[in-house]
Image (cartoon, rainbow, N blue to C red):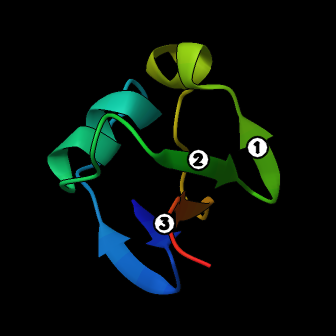
Amino acid sequence: MKITVNNKTVDLADCATVDMGAFLAGQGVPEKGVAAALNGRVVRRDLWSGTILKDGDTITVIRAVCGG
């Protein structure tokens, strides 16, 4: 299965049970200070672990930064 994360294609083993939270943790996404959208829709963090990824999905990860 192939998905796109921040414009980078990622190959995953075909598995209908890959959840977004586990996938993002495996990609080194920090637990705090980020938001994620799946196919253009923001997914609340408390729903990450139950959000199933499918072939062709697109994830956008946005990191909060301080500054001004």
In this figure, which residue is indicated by the disc labeled 2?
35
Q: Is residue 30 above or below residue 39?
A: above
Q: Residues within 10 Å of mark 2 (few under 14, many from 20)?
A: some
Q: Position of residue 59 (x, y in %)?
A: 57, 60
Q: Are marks 1 and 2 in contact (CB under 8 Å)?
A: yes
Quadrant that contains the C terminus: bottom right
Tell me the SS state at disc 3: loop
Quadrant that contains the N terminus: bottom left
Please say whether residue 18 is visible from this viewpoint. Answer: no
Q: Nearer the viewer, mark 1 or mark 3?
A: 3
Q: Is residue 15 above or below residue 58?
A: above
Tell me which amino acid carries mark 1: Val
Residue occupying image coordinates x 18% and y 54% = 28
Q: Is residue 31 above or below residue 14?
A: above
In this figure, which residue is indicated by the disc labeled 1?
42
Q: Is residue 14 above or below residue 9?
A: above
In this figure, which residue is indicated by the disc labeled 3?
65
Q: Position of residue 65 (x, y in %)?
A: 48, 66
